[in-house]
């Protein structure tokens, strides 16, 4: 019985700690400067700036404009190589007479 009370006490303590952390994070807000609890150093949130988002979009479009044609050309080359390989796979008997 005493073990059950100890487990319940531990669970209640963990739950209250979790609630305290959740409420502290809600109070701090998303865009504010935060302080490290160990060393006291300040760091800002990692929100992307508009310039970074635009640069990411431009780089993504540039990457796609290079990779899509390269992938298409690679597929065409692979298809041609398969055709050449399959053409050489068939056994053709030599003709004895050319006048068939």
Image: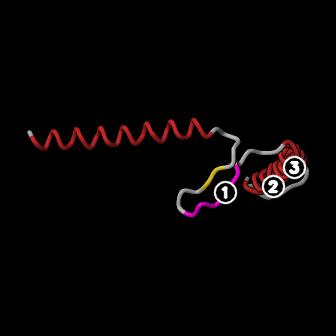
Mark 3 vs mark 2, CA separation in Å: 33 Å
Mark 2, residue position: 81
Mark 2 vs mark 1, CA separation in Å: 59 Å
Task: State the SS at label 2.
Answer: helix
At 90% across and 54% down in the image, what residue appears?
98
- Counting residues from the start of the chain, the first of labels 2 and 1 encountered is 1
Q: Residue furthest bottom?
A: 39
Mark 3 vs mark 2: give the one in front. Answer: 3
Q: Residues within 10 Å of mark 3 (few under 14, many from 20)?
A: few
* 43 is within the stretch colored magenta: yes
- Counting residues from the start of the chain, the first of labels 3 and 2 encountered is 3
At 81% across and 55% down in the image, what residue appears?
81
- What segment is highlighted magenta in the picture? 39-44
Q: Residues within 10 Å of mark 2 (few under 14, many from 20)?
A: few
Nearest the eye: 84 or 99? 84
- Counting residues from the start of the chain, the first of labels 3 and 1 encountered is 1
Mark 2 vs mark 1: give the one in front. Answer: 1
At 48% across and 42% down in the image, what residue appears?
21
Q: Is residue 72 visible?
A: no
Mark 3 vs mark 1, CA separation in Å: 31 Å
Nearest the eye: 24 or 49? 24
Q: Residue furthest left?
A: 1
Task: State the SS at label 1.
Answer: strand
Mark 1, residue position: 42
* 1 is within the stretch colored magenta: no
Tell me, for residue 59, which label it has, or none: 3
């Amino acid at each position: 019985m005493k073990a059950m009370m100890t487990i319940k006490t531990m669970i209640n303590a963990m739950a209250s700690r979790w609630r305290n952390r959740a409420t502290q994070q809600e109070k701090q807000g998303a865009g504010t400067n935060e302080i490290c609890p160990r060393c006291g150093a300040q760091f800002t949130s990692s929100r992307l700036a508009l310039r970074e988002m635009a640069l990411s979009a431009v780089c993504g479009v540039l990457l796609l404009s290079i990779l899509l044609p390269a992938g298409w050309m690679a597929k065409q080359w692979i298809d041609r190589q398969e055709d050449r390989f399959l053409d050489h796979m068939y056994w053709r008997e030599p003709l004895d007479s050319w006048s068939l």
